[in-house]
Image (cartoon, rainbow, N blue to C red):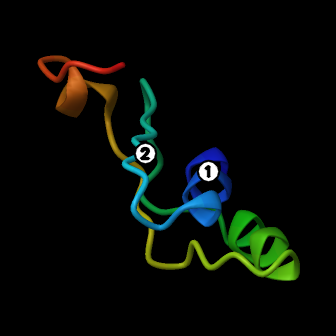
Amino acid sequence: MAEGILKSFDKNLVVHSAGAKPAARVHPKAVEVMKEIGIDISRNEPKPVDRFLHDSFD
């Protein structure tokens, strides 16, 4: 949800969100609630934090 909100500020903004134990899919209630505020996260996917361990962030 945080990723969706941050990306809504600027579609060119690079945002990453990940978890230690990501679910198989974004929870349907999260998709529903975000839709209520005009943000579509239905195509987002949960990602493991391991994917970003070697990336640098600012």
Q: Earlier in the sequence, mark 2 or mark 1?
A: 1
Crowding near the residue tagged with mark 2, few <14, some 14–19, many ≥20 C-alpha atoms within 10 Å = few
- Quarter of the image for the C terminus: give it: top left
> What is the x, y in percent for residue 27?
64, 62
Callout 2 amino acid: Val
> What is the x, y in percent for residue 1?
66, 53
What residue is rendered at 21% in x and 18% in y?
Answer: 56
What residue is rendered at 32% in x and 27% in y?
Answer: 49
What residue is rendered at 22% in x and 28% in y?
Answer: 52
Considering the numbered disc 1 on the image, is that residue within a helix, a strand or a loop? helix
User: Label 2 to label 1, Cα distance in Å?
Assistant: 7 Å
The residue tagged 2 is: 15
Q: Which mark is residue 33?
A: none
| Cβ atoms under marks 2 and 1 closer than 8 Å | yes
Considering the numbered disc 2 on the image, is that residue within a helix, a strand or a loop? loop
Give the residue at the far left of this rendering: 54
| Drawn side of residue 27 relative to residue 32, left or right | left
| Drawn side of residue 57 relative to residue 50, left or right | right
What residue is rendered at 77% in x and 70% in y?
Answer: 34
Q: Is residue 8 above or below residue 46?
A: below
Callout 1 amino acid: Leu
Q: Is residue 45 above or below residue 20?
A: below
Q: Which mark is residue 6?
A: 1
